[in-house]
Amino acid sequence: MPNARPVPTVRRRRLGEALRRYRNATGMSLDVAAEAVGWIGPKLSRIETANGHIRPNEVAGLLKVYGIDDPEIVSALEGLAKDARKQGWWQTYSGIVAPAYADYISLESDADSIHEFAPLLIPGLLQTAAYARETIAANATTRTPDEVAALAEVRQARQAVLTRPGTPLKIWAVVHEAVFHQRFAVRPNIMRDQLQRLLDVSEMPNVTLQILPLDATPHPGGAGAFSLVGFPGPMPDVVLLENLIGATYVEGVDEVQTFANAYERIVAAALPTEDSLGRIARMEERCRK
């Protein structure tokens, strides 16, 4: 039976993009670079386009050809090569979790920070189980009740990154005030419990929460939601854009910087953290009456 063609993952794409960037910086062609390590051009091309594998022990040799010997860079790229096929806990839900979503969960598990602008929903890492079930059911219109329940379990399991030992994920979320006015007619306590959840997690040192008020000054958030995912060491950040049929990743350095600049402007337009938490507390109190 022939070997299956490798399916590009975000890890493999990040690795290929980094290697391509370092090669281009030298001015070397694919054929010249490949020949320097005893390969043929098509092999290196497949690696750079995320359609081929590179073993961790091959990474340092290729980087040496490009004049890259920084231990931090070498280690980071070797780690990507090693983890390109890594199976995570989410593989248990492989029949439920779409490939693009699985890619994002793997990114989230590698990341050290996420900056998220949420104009429509509470960010998944901060949701209660009940809020997750209701919002997933509303958006996943083709899913069965059992699939909705499984996706809600996945969303809850993802939150473990906030309390992982040693290096918990840092999240900075700017949530539009309109999100807090959503009502759940069948289960009116959902928003009250969700507001309390936000107050609880805001006490964690790795969680920053701001509200973008209805009367905010003009800002780039009108273009829609996005998540800016940051990684330790030399690896470039990635941006996630979502819609009803899937996810799109922005991986070019210049394009990602555009979103980083936009996020700074959104943060500036949002309420300060203390004021945001005060407003959430007042909304939670009104929900209890």
Image (spheres, rainbow, N blue to C red):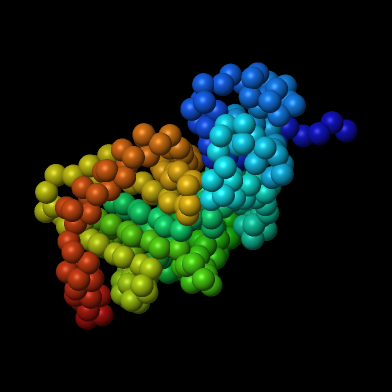
x and y, in percent, of residue 263 in the image: 27, 48
Relative to residue 22, is residue 222 drawn left or right?
left
Relative to residue 152, is residue 267 drawn left or right?
left
Which residue is most to the bottom? 289
Relative to residue 187, is residue 5 drawn left or right?
right
Can residue 229 be spotted in the picture?
yes
Can residue 20 be spotted in the picture?
no
Task: Depth check: give the residue in front, 32 or 80.
Answer: 32
x and y, in percent, of residue 186 in the image: 37, 67
Above or below 61: residue 286: below
x and y, in percent, of residue 88 in the image: 64, 57
The image quadrant where one finds the C terminus is: bottom left
x and y, in percent, of residue 114 in the image: 40, 55
Task: Depth check: give the residue in front, 130 or 255.
Answer: 255
Task: Depth check: give the residue in front, 261 or 154.
Answer: 261
Which residue is most to the right? 1
Residue visible at 43% across and 51% down? Answer: 230
Task: Depth check: give the residue in front, 243 or 65.
Answer: 65
Q: In the rendered image, which quarter is residue 179 located in? A: bottom left
Above or below 265: residue 187: below
Residue visible at 45% across and 37% down? Answer: 251
The image quadrant where one finds the N terminus is: top right
Residue visible at 28% across and 57% down? Answer: 174
Q: How many marks?
A: 0
Q: In the rendered image, which quarter is residue 187 located in? A: bottom left
Relative to residue 287, is residue 155 drawn left or right?
right
